[in-house]
Image (cartoon, coloured by chain):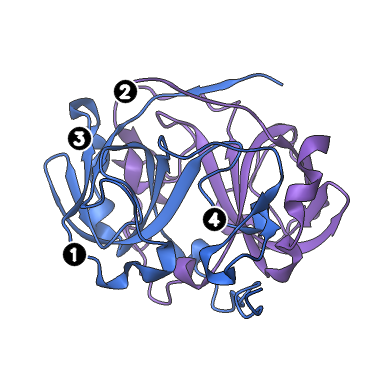
Chain colours: A purple, B blue
Amino acid sequence: MNIIVYRPIGVIRTPYSDMAPFQAEECDAEGPFVLELLPEYETALEDLECFRYIIVLFHMDRARGYNGSGVAHPPSLKGGIVGLFASRSPNRPNPIGLDVARLLGIEGRKVYTSGLSVLDETPLIDIKPYTRMDSKSDPGDGWANRQPM
Amino acid sequence: MNIIVYRPIGVIRTPYSDMAPFQAEECDAEGPFVLELLPEYETALEDLECFRYIIVLFHMDRARGYNGSGVAHPPSLKGGIVGLFASRSPNRPNPIGLDVARLLGIEGRKVYTSGLSVLDETPLIDIKPYTRMDSKSDPGDGWANRQPM
């Protein structure tokens, strides 16, 4: 199968230079968190403010990479492992990150959001509106209640 | 900014060879809808069955491409336009598609899901578990209640 080539549409500014918090912990994050688009995409932000939440896709450029083992070590399992695709680990074959964020405001080509578990200067790949199709009231807990090892 | 290179982790099988339904219409879709992973990723599916829903990321290889205008023409607006990033149009700078799907079962390296608005043979880029972080009970309607032009 062929390779797929994408280009950043902008960059994400966050307070995290070394280590971003795990997604479940980001509620109290102090910002600002800003998606800064390239100038040519400013007009494409029109109407986004109608939405309460947005889906942010980004390229986790500082991930360690996929080690071929097929497993991840979620911090909450303290040594336990799960299959990589059952995790949100950044060290996956294609290191695309996904966060659902509250949209706080847009000024020109800057989109202000609630806390993102994203390192500063991370390349932004896409922004999508979060809609009712994305909202599932019964997500379940997955392996979250498993005992740590 | 640099280019980003990804590789498919598998392929998506759907009944749609020419045109996929818009995401809001897919509820009654007749399957099967199958994510078929490359053999080397079969073990990475371990534990995914703990989750009720999954996030499917795919490369919309038959999208027309981004035309530079920054606008999209959502079918429901019948001629109306919205900013591209306020839409789920496939014709975006980086044509990554995202569907939240019900996980129906896993057999070997095949993942069976509920209806996907995806063309047959679409390259699969990533699978992520859908968790409480992704579940927002108040998504709002965005521009959905706007009058068609």
Residue A97 shows in this picture? yes
Same subunit, tags 1 and 2: no
Residue occupying the point 41% across, 34% down? B61
Q: Which residue is mark 2?
A: A68
Residue flagged by tag 3: what amino acid is it? Glu
Residue flagged by tag 2: what amino acid is it? Gly
Q: In the drawing, what numbered circle is on residue A80?
A: none
Q: Is residue B138 left or right of residue A91?
A: right
Same subunit, tags 4 and 2: no
Marks 4 & 1, CB-CB < 8 Å contact: no
Q: Nearer the viewer, mark 1 or mark 3?
A: 1
Q: Earlier in the sequence, mark 4 or mark 3?
A: 3
Residue A81 shows in this picture? no
Q: Nearer the viewer, mark 2 or mark 3?
A: 3
CA–CA distance in space, label 1 to label 3: 25 Å
Q: In the drawing, what numbered circle is on residue B42?
A: 3
Residue occupying the point 60% across, 38% down? B66
Q: Residue furthest left?
A: B107
Q: Position of residue B92 (x, y in %)?
A: 59, 42
Crowdedness near tag 1: few (<14), some (14–19) or many (≥20) residues, C-alpha within 10 Å? few
Picture layout, residue A71 above or below residue A131: above
Picture layout, residue B103 above or below residue B136: above
CA–CA distance in space, label 4 to label 3: 30 Å
Q: Which residue is mark 1?
A: B30
Q: Earlier in the sequence, mark 1 or mark 3?
A: 1
